[in-house]
């Protein structure tokens, strides 16, 4: 009898161990490339969400979550696809936080995620084209579409008394989509776009582009580019030649590295970036400062990265499955809560409680750091921070 009990106990222990799973989540963002100054904060925040859940011990089936980092480069679709393919086939990730920039995100969605049935939650890919991309119900965004940013920027320009703009954009899916949105919205409020031309990233000389922009003229130059590459180069060349002295800065141009690189000449420029003023934003900002691996939650797309990781883990818990084809259906439910509005709000630092409620079959409404509400097929409704650069710092004007 004793042997039977011991054997039974051993069998139960083995079953318990067998059911435990190291659940790998990919973080596919541009650790090199034109937004590399942002992505360290983004990755650290996503990993902080995983660590928070792991420390709680509340995940079903003994799951523990670990990250697999991959470099999307932001701009090289082939490199991003190779990194994503490795994540899926070699590392066996169960979901991807990413991509980051819109072009590489679309390529990975179509050529890796859909064929392999893997969920992607992007914290920063904002091209309007992604709103209608075929995704088999696998693609979500915690950042809003640039269609909305174009409207916000047009309103800001109008309020500043701007009647005409020159416009240049990174020659990428992100840049083209954003520039079109800005031009359409600014024209709709009575403004004039004197010129709308692309620029290539990675060049050492932007004098030809700046000459064309200067010839067209405008009250200011709107740069729909990337802060660590072409966008920065356009601004510096404009200042060096005296072509423009003030700039409109959309989200891809926002980060501490830009005013550090340009200096006091950037003061007085202004724009907007997707960011929330929700209660959760303040909580995550404090958490980031205190984290073992610190991150700046106010850095662009950092809040959205924490939220992307949290949504995946909570959806897995709700589905009791790490299979993307099963838990994908739970993401909107977790993000938006029940139709009756009775889901309990979950903020950063409360993931343990959220996992516990979901496991018990109770409804939650994951508000997170960025005030998550997903609309359409699964993209953020979004809030924007309006700012002006003063003394080399991004000073918040208000939220929209």
Image (spheres, rainbow, N blue to C red):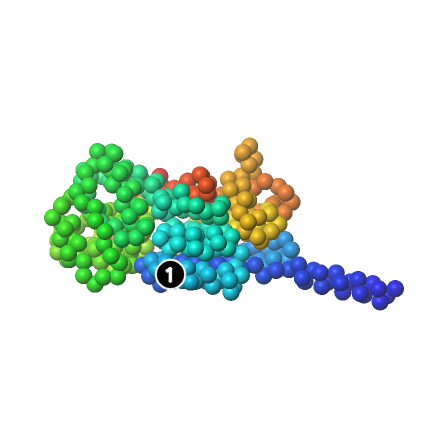
> How would you rate the neighbour count of disc 1 (Cα within 10 Å): few for under 14, some for 14-19, many for 20 or more?
some
Residue for point 54% across, 44% down = 329
Residue for point 25% across, 41% down = 183
Residue 78: x and y, percent? 37, 61
Residue for point 32% across, 55% down = 255
Residue 13: x and y, percent? 73, 62
Q: Is residue 205 left or right of residue 281?
A: left
Q: Is residue 147 left or right of residue 11?
A: left
Residue 92: x and y, percent? 53, 61
Q: Is residue 19 left or right of residue 44?
A: right
Report which residue position mark 1 lands on: 78
User: Residue 99 versus residue 159: which sits nearer the camera?
Assistant: 99
Identify the image quadrant of residue 73: bottom left
Q: Is residue 284 visible?
A: no
Residue 119: x and y, percent? 50, 51
User: Residue 2 versus residue 199: which sits nearer the camera?
Assistant: 199
Identify the image quadrant of residue 202: bottom left
Image quadrant for the N terminus?
A: bottom right
Name the residue furthest bottom: 3
Q: Is residue 57 visible?
A: yes
Image quadrant for the C terminus?
A: top left
Find numbered disc 1 in the image and state the secondary structure of the residue it sits on: helix
Residue for point 63% across, 53% down = 60
> How many numbered marks have been drawn onto this rendered protein structure?
1
Name the residue furthest right: 1
Q: Is residue 131 left or right of residue 194?
A: right
């Amino acid at each position: 009898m004793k042997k039977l009990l011991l054997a039974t106990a051993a069998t139960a222990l083995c079953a318990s161990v067998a059911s435990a799973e190291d659940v790998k989540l990919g973080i596919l963002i541009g650790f090199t490339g034109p937004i590399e100054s942002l992505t360290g904060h983004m990755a650290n925040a996503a990993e902080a969400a995983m660590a928070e859940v792991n420390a709680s011990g509340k995940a079903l089936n003994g799951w523990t979550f670990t990250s697999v980092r991959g470099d999307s480069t932001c701009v090289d679709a082939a490199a991003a696809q190779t990194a994503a393919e490795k994540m899926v086939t070699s590392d066996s990730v169960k979901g991807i936080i990413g991509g980051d920039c819109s072009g590489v995100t679309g390529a990975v969605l179509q050529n890796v995620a859909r064929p392999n049935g893997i969920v992607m939650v992007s914290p920063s890919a904002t091209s309007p084209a992604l709103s209608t991309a075929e995704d088999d119900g696998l693609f979500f965004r915690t950042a809003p579409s640039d269609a909305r940013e174009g409207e916000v920027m047009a309103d800001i320009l109008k309020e500043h008394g701007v009647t005409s703009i020159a416009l240049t954009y990174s020659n990428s899916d992100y840049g083209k989509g954003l520039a079109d949105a800005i031009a359409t919205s600014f024209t709709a409020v009575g403004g004039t776009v004197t010129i709308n031309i692309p620029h290539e990233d990675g060049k050492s000389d932007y004098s030809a582009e700046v000459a064309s922009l200067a010839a067209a003229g405008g009250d200011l130059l709107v740069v729909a580019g990337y802060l660590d590459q072409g966008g920065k180069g356009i601004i510096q060349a404009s200042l060096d030649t005296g072509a423009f002295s003030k700039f409109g800065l959309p989200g891809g141009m926002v980060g501490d590295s830009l005013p550090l690189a340009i200096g006091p000449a950037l003061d007085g420029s202004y724009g907007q970036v997707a960011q929330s003023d929700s209660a959760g934003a303040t909580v995550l900002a404090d958490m980031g400062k205190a984290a073992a691996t610190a991150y700046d939650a106010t850095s662009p797309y950092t809040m959205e990265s924490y939220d992307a990781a949290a949504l995946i883990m909570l959806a897995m818990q709700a589905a009791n499955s790490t299979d993307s084809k099963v838990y994908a259906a739970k993401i909107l439910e977790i993000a938006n809560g029940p139709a009756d509005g009775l889901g309990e709000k979950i903020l950063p630092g409360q993931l343990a409680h959220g996992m516990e409620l979901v496991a018990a079959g109770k409804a939650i409404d994951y508000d997170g750091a960025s005030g998550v509400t997903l609309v359409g097929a699964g993209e953020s409704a979004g809030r924007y921070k309006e700012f002006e650069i003063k003394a080399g710092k991004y000073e918040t004007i208000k939220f929209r």
